[in-house]
Amino acid sequence: MEGQILEQRSSYRRGLVLGLTMAEIMVLLVFCLLIAMAAFLKREETRRVAAEQELKQEKAQNAEIRDVVNSLSKSAAVAEKVESLSGLSDPQAIDQYWRELVDSRSVIKEIEKNLSAKELREGAANIAALRANGIDVDKAIRDAEIVGAINRAMSKPGEPPVSAQNVLDTLARGMAGDGGGHQWPPIIRMSEADGYFFKSGSAELSPSFRDALAVKTPIEILNYIRKYDVDIIEVVGHTDERPIGARQFSNLDRDLLPVLKNDAGVISLVPADNAGLGLARAVAVVSVLRQSPLLAGYKLIPLSGAQLVNTDETLAISPSPGDIQQRRRIEIRLRKSSSGETTGSLPPTAAAVPR
């Protein structure tokens, strides 16, 4: 009996412990559920408060809109003003016009985020000033884009941008091309009267003449090339009518090419007459110009006018055998090569290739 009683007591205790454990688990589950429910209710409460705030804002905006509408409906002057500005009579069209005004205000606010009010006022003032002077702002913008495109097309790699004046000159030549004829570049004249000397009866350049041909003249030629869209540089040597002296032979046939290539000095040339002297002097000038990187790629052609052309472009038919410095000159003439022209120039020397 005592064993049975002890066993029953032990079972009772186990049952009691198990019951208490299950009760504790249930309490914990209920507690967790309560916590989850509290969090859910808190979140829903936050959403409800936010929704109420949005609703209040919407109500306030609607109230403002109703007030504006009521004011507009009560003010015949304002209604007439909106109708006159919009040019509309249909109420729905006027309403759409009003909505567009509101949208425009939103756009202006977005613009103000990127531009200051001062910049907007200055831009509006500039546009108003242009329009007041009869300038179409849209057309001016298109013209600026056209000029920019021409500038990019005319610019060459490694060279400075083309100036606005050169662009305008190119446009002017293009517009005058049909009926105005070709606009020829000016002739660059370099005579003894201007301080550009050769040694008497020789093609040897004075130091100052050589310096001008190496520094100043290539820049002047390049400016004309860009302005008039030409690619051939003709260098013409002119003399006066005085004979250069009795000479039995001329070595121009043999030595002109080496001088052009800078393989021989100009002093080695021996012309026998003024025609040869004019050509030798033109070759001397070309040999210097060829060394300028500014003129690389353009055609350089030496020619002789001898004593046959006056300074006024007339033939020297009437004898003038005196010492006339103006006639002893170099003329640099620029022109554009004709289609299919095969005339070439010697390749530039190594020193003339730009790097």
Image (cartoon, rainbow, N blue to C red):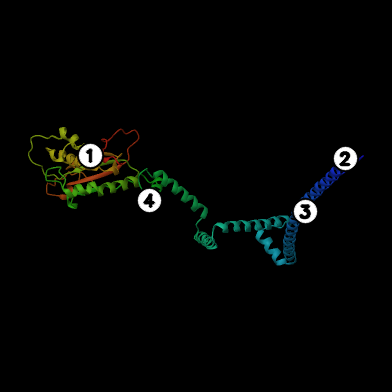
* Residue contact between numbered discs 1 and 3, judged by CB atoms under 8 Å: no
Q: Secondary structure at mark 2?
A: helix
Which mark lies nearer to you, 3 or 4?
A: 3
Percent x, y for residue 247? 8, 37
Q: Are marks 3 and 4 in contact (CB under 8 Å)?
A: no
Task: Tell me whether the residue at label 3 lies in contact with that at label 2, contact meaning CB atoms closer than 8 angstroms.
Answer: no
Q: Earlier in the sequence, mark 4 or mark 2?
A: 2
What distance separates the C-alpha of mark 4 from that of mark 1? 30 Å
Residue at the spot 80% in from the left edge and 47% down from the top edge: 29
According to the image, label 1 marks what residue?
Answer: 302
Per the image, the residue denoted by label 2 is 7
Read off the residue under disc 3. Answer: 38
Considering only order in the chain, which callout, 2 or 3, is on the residue closer to the N terminus?
A: 2
CA–CA distance in space, label 1 to label 3: 103 Å
Comparing 106 with 15, the one in front is 15
Q: Count all numbered tags in the image, as a single digit.
A: 4
Q: Say whether disc 3 or disc 4 marks the residue closer to the N-terminus.
A: 3
Q: Amino acid at mark 3?
A: Ala
Question: Given the image, on which type of amino acid does mark 2 rest?
Answer: Glu
Q: Nearer the viewer, mark 1 or mark 2?
A: 2
SS at circle 4: loop
From the image, tell me which residue sits under label 4.
163
The percent coordinates of residue 195 (x first, y second) are 18, 52
Q: Residue at x 77, y 49 (%)?
A: 32
Report x, y in % for residue 300: 26, 39
Q: CA distance from mark 1 to mark 2?
A: 137 Å
- Local secondary structure at mark 3: helix
- 299 lies left or right of 245: right
Give how far apart the Cα atoms at labels 3 and 4 are.
Answer: 77 Å
Q: Is residue 182 visible?
A: no
